[in-house]
């Protein structure tokens, strides 16, 4: 697991390439459906653990292409640096170029309701909180679309639509982070003070989060209602927001339980809803639908890979919450004080002796000092 965590950037790039498959035909369907689930799972394991000691033969890029029965388009928007695939500065610049339009459009929409003061506050909350997302998750939607859509539709207009859709996703992440920081009583996010801790904000941040959530639906209605995939996009956002909030609810409920009850099945259920669905599943599936992909096997196999990646991402996040340098992570960790069902806590319960479990039961989730018994 630690090897996977250390190699997460490489894993992320590998999985992104393995899920981005060129489609052909009028309906953008895969020419040869993926039907051998067991073989797909074996392929996924080899991709997820490059360089591991195994008697199995590792799939080369060519072998992966032969397996999927289709040519994987080379992703020109990724640059390589020290062996890692990175999003190009040009791609990020093009994505950020849409940002002022997003702010202006949402401000104008709010002004329709005869409240310039509320519209100005809405813009202020957007500017501050969108800066606390990494702005790269939305690019996953753009890269997915560019890699799957037929070349004849990759014009400036459609690429801008993909970028707007990516910003809709960023807005979803934005309002979720606002509420998450309030519930977790966090003080910083990416090196900046959390929105609800700023003077003049406080718990009105909850209302700001609702504004941002509904703002993304305004953008969807304005830019995508003429497309066949409009209903699919709406359902994706609605269903995944609900799943994410369910995950957040489970996260809160688990903090009321004793750490000795934490186990890996509960943790995986938490990650499945809280992390995988909105950080990975949603941006990729948005790009798939916008590109016109209809083959259910593509969605099925992508989903399996995405959920694995979500587990690795959350485990890394939990590790950094405790051991990460706040000057680098931009956040002061609070999982231990908050009694979170984290990967570290679960692994501790799996390997601890009875005496060590007793120490955890007494001290985990405590804000103050805890007198440690001698073991």
Image (tube, grey):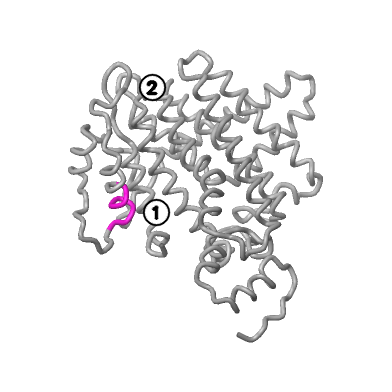
| Residue 139 spot, x, y in % from top left | 45, 38
In the image, residue 237 above or below residue 41: above
Question: Image point 33% across, 29% down: which residue?
Answer: 148
Q: Mark 1: few, some, or many residues within 10 Å (few <14, many ≥20)? A: some
Q: Determine whether label 1 and label 2 are within 8 Å by CB.
A: no
Where disc 1 sits, the SS reads helix
| Residue 235 spot, x, y in % from top left | 54, 25
Where disc 2 sits, the SS reads loop
Q: Mark 2: few, some, or many residues within 10 Å (few <14, many ≥20)? A: some
Q: In the image, which disc is placed on residue 56?
A: none
| Mark 1 to mark 2 CA distance (whole Å) | 28 Å
Residue 234 belongs to the span the image colors magenta: no
| Residue 60 spot, x, y in % from top left | 20, 48
The residue closer to the viewer here, 108 or 188, is 188
In the image, residue 225 above or below residue 370: above
Question: Image point 57% across, 62% down: which residue?
Answer: 321
Q: Residue 172: which quarter of the image?
A: top right
Question: Image point 59% across, 63% down: which residue?
Answer: 326
Bounds of the magenta segment: 44-50
The residue closer to the viewer here, 267 or 236, is 267
Q: Which residue is mark 1?
A: 9
Question: Image point 65% across, 26% down: which residue?
Answer: 106
In the image, residue 112 above or below residue 272: above
Q: Of the residues under marks 1 and 2, which one precedes in the sequence?
A: 1
Q: Which residue is mark 2?
A: 292
Q: Decide whether the magenta segment is chiefly helix, strand or loop.
A: helix
| Residue 304 spot, x, y in % from top left | 39, 42
In the image, residue 369 above or below residue 270: below
């Amino acid at each position: 697991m630690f090897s996977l965590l250390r190699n997460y950037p490489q894993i992320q790039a590998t999985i992104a390439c393995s899920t981005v498959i060129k489609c052909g035909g009028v309906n953008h369907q895969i020419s040869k459906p993926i039907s051998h689930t067991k073989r797909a799972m074996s392929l996924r394991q080899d991709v997820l653990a490059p360089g591991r000691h195994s008697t199995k033969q590792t799939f080369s890029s060519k072998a992966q292409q032969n397996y999927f029965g289709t040519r994987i388009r080379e992703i020109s928007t990724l640059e390589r640096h020290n062996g890692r695939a990175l999003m190009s500065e040009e791609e990020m610049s093009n994505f950020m170029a849409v940002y002022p339009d997003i702010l202006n459009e949402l401000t104008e929409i709010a002004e329709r309701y005869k409240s310039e003061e509320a519209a100005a506050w809405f813009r202020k909350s957007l500017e501050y909180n969108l800066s606390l997302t990494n702005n790269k998750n939305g690019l996953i939607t753009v890269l997915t679309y560019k890699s799957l859509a037929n070349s004849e539709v990759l014009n400036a207009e459609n690429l801008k639509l993909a970028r707007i859709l990516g910003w809709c996703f960023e807005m979803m992440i934005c309002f979720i982070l606002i509420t998450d920081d309030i519930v977790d009583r966090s003080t910083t996010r990416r090196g900046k003070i959390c929105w609800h801790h700023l003077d003049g904000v406080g718990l009105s941040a909850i209302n700001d989060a609702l504004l941002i959530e509904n703002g993304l639906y305004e953008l969807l209605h304005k830019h995508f209602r003429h497309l066949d995939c409009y209903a699919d996009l709406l359902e994706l956002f609605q269903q995944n927001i609900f799943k994410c909030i369910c995950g957040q609810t489970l996260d809160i409920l688990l903090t009321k339980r004793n750490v000795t009850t934490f186990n890996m099945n509960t943790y995986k259920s938490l990650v499945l809803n809280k992390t995988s669905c909105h950080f990975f599943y949603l941006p990729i599936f948005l790009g798939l639908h916008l590109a016109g992909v209809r083959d259910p096997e593509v969605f099925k196999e992508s989903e399996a890979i995405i959920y694995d990646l979500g587990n690795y991402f959350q485990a890394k996040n939990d590790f950094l919450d405790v051991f990460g340098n706040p000057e680098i992570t931009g956040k002061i960790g609070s999982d231990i004080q908050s009694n979170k069902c984290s990967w570290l806590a679960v692994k501790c319960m799996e390997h601890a002796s009875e005496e060590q479990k007793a120490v955890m039961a007494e001290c985990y989730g405590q804000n103050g000092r805890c007198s440690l018994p001698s073991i």
